[in-house]
Amino acid sequence: MPSLEEMLQTDFLVIGSGLAGLRAAIELSERGKSCILISKSELAHSNTYYAQGGIAAVDPERVAQGDDSFESHIEDTLRAGDGLCIPSVVERFVQRAFPDGVRFLIDHGVPFSKADPDKQYVLHQEGGHGRPRVYCKDDYTGQAIEEHLVELVRKQPLITVLEYHAAVSLITRNRISEVKVAKDRCLGAWVLDRTTRRVKTIEADMTFLSTGGAGRAFLYTSNPENATGDGIAMAYRAGARVANMEFFQFHPTVLYEVSPEHPAERRFLLTEALRGEAMGGVLTLDKDSTQDFVLAYDPRGSHATRDIVAKAIDTEMKKRHLTHVWLNVTTRLTGKPEEYIRQSFPKIYAHCLKKGIDMTAEPIPVVPAAHYTCGGVIVGADGQTDIDGLYAIGEVACTGLMGANRLASNSLTECALYGKIAVDAALERDPSLRDPDLKPPPWQGSTVHPEINPAMLNRFWDTTRATMLDYCAIDRNENRLRVAMDILNGLVQITNDIYWHFYPTLEIIELRNLSLVARLIVESALHRKESRGGHFRSDYPERNDHLFQGATIIQQTTGIRLLKCRHT
């Protein structure tokens, strides 16, 4: 059996290497603080890497010139959030988005696209935005940000990088002590070294969860394979509150492909900017049509927010028995020269061409896919969770910014901004004394078996994701959700049994987390008997502010409830 003896100590532990985690690690190092940064796979492999569109922010200089306003960005964010954003959080976010978010990236050398000859930054206007304010690097902004910051992190001696290390469980004082306290404290994490198959105990004064979202809970998703809701599941098990898990954003446009060999692979994303004002692409029901069918659902048509567009596509596909719809960005429709399209969206153009589609001359077949977790671990204004010493930043967190539906390109900004905000707060707190009784992980003993049949895990994995797609995707109702709940309750119990009776592997860890987060999504969707933002109930199709204008709170010790008026 692999050794369980390795133990590390650090002042700061960062779990996850997307933009939020990288920003936190860089911020700590630039203030002379050392930290350990762990990544479940290679450092650059994160949701950030696959973000195409860009990062939204209002530059104060553009405000002074009358080209944009903070009020406009605030209004757009609140409108997208469909009544569940916290206005004070949104206001602070918008005010600080450029100076503490985008400016940090510019100052650290991220090469955002510029327009000739005046060298002004190229700004896209994506769905739901009233003005162009989305900074980009062509159509691979996330990749450009991730690769550049990873390079900086690797050069920083104060950052200890542990790649191929998967967090197994958070260590809290109540978890290892016989005497329980009302206010628990995080002491670090048990972490699986995937290379040596050792579970390490990493003791930390402050721990930052930046593990991303849970798109892999659904069979069809734009997310990479490591988006399995790890941070949400670990925080929930540790006693933290989780909120708004029913609000799962489906991206309206991922490339439709029939892939029987790889049915569950990440779907290729087609950025919102293709449907933005500058490009002018529209969604059609017929390959030869130029009629924007989304106009029947919203006066903004294909430029509306993601929840509206995704629901319109889903409705039409079911009504007309379609396998997909069409995204038309052709020169004939948009009037954009072929060279402009190729230069503006080089990655998308090349990928589509590889699939036999020339997007300058023919429309692209598209379908919606699970994309972004709008809910997450509840945090305060400084990123602090319910558990002392534990911060959550990025997609794993529920800050009050996203509400019921995320405005396009606010997510990268949130990652960049809250990585700084959480570090600011952590540095102001006095670290607790390390616990002298910190124990090794609890997987020793004769009842622990070293191996498990991977085929069994694959069946449970496929069942979880197919259940979510069939019963808890864009269109939900009571009967389907209750079927999903019954299935997932069984899966959660089975995966917990596997976890405690077999030596932990990455597959066991991810399956346990994924099945739990899937159940949290379904349980929250059952509780919210209305339709709002990224949550649509065909049996309750209207928004109900009287009963449901508030956050859906779920906690291991207290169950599920609605916290009224959290948006205020």
Image (tube, rainbow, N blue to C red):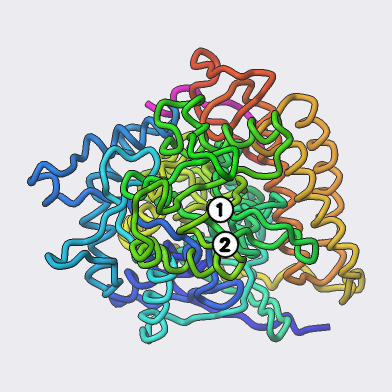
Left or right, residue 409 beside residue 173: left
Residue 93 versus residue 26 in the image, above or below: above
Q: Which residues are magenta?
A: 556-568
In x, y percent, where is residue 69?
18, 40
Residue 51 versus residue 558 in the image, above or below: below
Report the number of discs. 2
Q: Which residue is mark 1?
A: 364
Q: Earlier in the sequence, mark 2 or mark 1?
A: 2
Left or right, residue 33 beside residue 442: left
Residue furthest to the top? 546
Amino acid type of the residue tagged 1 in the rendering: Ile
In x, y percent, where is residue 465?
75, 50
Q: Is residue 68 visible?
A: yes
Mark 1: few/some/many CA within 10 Å (<14, 14-19, 20+):
many
Residue 382, which numbered label? none
Quarter of the image where the N terminus is located: bottom right
Amino acid type of the residue tagged 2 in the rendering: Ile
The answer to whether residue 214 is magenta is no
In x, y percent, where is residue 35?
43, 75
Q: Which residue is mark 2?
A: 357
Which type of secondary structure does the marked residue at label 2 adopt? Answer: loop
Q: Residue at x 53, y 51 (%)?
A: 363
Dot 2 and dot 1 residues touching (CB under 8 Å)? yes
Quarter of the image where the C terminus is located: top left
Q: Residue at x 30, y 71 (%)?
A: 110
Residue 413 versus residue 519 in the image, above or below: below
Which type of secondary structure does the marked residue at label 1 adopt? Answer: strand
Q: Is residue 241 visible?
A: no
The residues bearing labels 2 and 1 have C-alpha atoms spaced at a distance of: 7 Å
Residue 132 versus residue 122 in the image, above or below: above
